[in-house]
Image (cartoon, grey):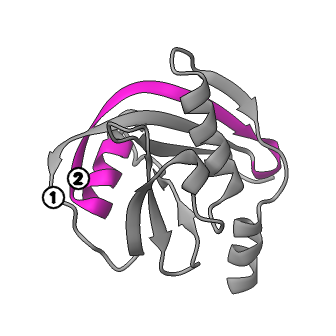
Amino acid sequence: MRDFRVGDFALIFDDRDRIFLCLREDLSVWNLLGVRAEAGESPWYAVIREVKEETGLDVRVERLAGVYWRPEQMEVNFAFECHTVGGMLIKIWESVETGYFALDEIPERTALRHVARVRDALDEPEKTVLRTQLGTSWWESIERDLA
């Protein structure tokens, strides 16, 4: 039996409700910034830390936008809506490119479950969405093929 996992993701919106995405160098896919909390670290602090480490940006967590259960992976993911409050954007090896995208401009090679999380946050701005996300994404298929 696999271990239960928890993932923490940042939904970073600008003042025009565009979402911040990173193009991963290793898989050539766009995604939300995500991390697993370190021992003793809260999920929301893990997101703040990861955003700073991966982008140089300082963010404030505004709300828990969604909780996503992925039964096939024995994984629950928290999606936190965040806003930039400082820092300077830096480039690291993992991200070939970064940018803000309107929902209808999200690049084609973006993890579909991440697009669903963005849509949920925009469609339900006063609510925490609880959703089961089934199936293996094409991103996980790529990861499996590279292993």
Residue under the image location 69 percent in, 49 percent down = 113
Marks 1 and 2 close (CB-CB < 8 Å): yes
Who's the residue at 40% across and 73% down the image? 97
- Res. 62 visible in picture: yes
Q: Residues within 10 Å of mark 1 (few under 14, many from 20)?
A: few
Q: Residue at x 28, y 61 (%)?
A: 55
Residue 45 rendering spot, x and y as whole percentages: 32, 38
Q: Is residue 147 visible?
A: no
Residue that protrudes farthest toward the left in the picture:
87
**What residue did someone put label 2 on?**
57
* Callout 2: SS: strand
On the rendered structure, is 133 left or right of 118? right
In the rendered structure, which segment of residues is drawn in magenta?
47-73
Residue 8 image point, x, y percent:
49, 43
The amino acid type of the residue labelled 2 equals Leu
Q: CA distance from mark 1 to mark 2?
A: 6 Å
> Residue at label 1?
88
Q: Is residue 87 above or below residue 117?
A: below
Residue type of the residue flagged with mark 1: Met
Query: Is residue 75 on the magenta stretch?
Result: no
Relative placement, left or right, of 61 versus 37 is left
135 and 3: which is toward the camera: 135
Tell me residue 145's x, y (percent).
Answer: 75, 83
Residue 12 picture location, percent across and down:
39, 43
Residue 15: name its quadrant: top left
Q: Earlier in the sequence, mark 1 or mark 2?
A: 2
Q: Nearer the viewer, residue 110 or 129?
A: 110
Element carrying mark 1: loop
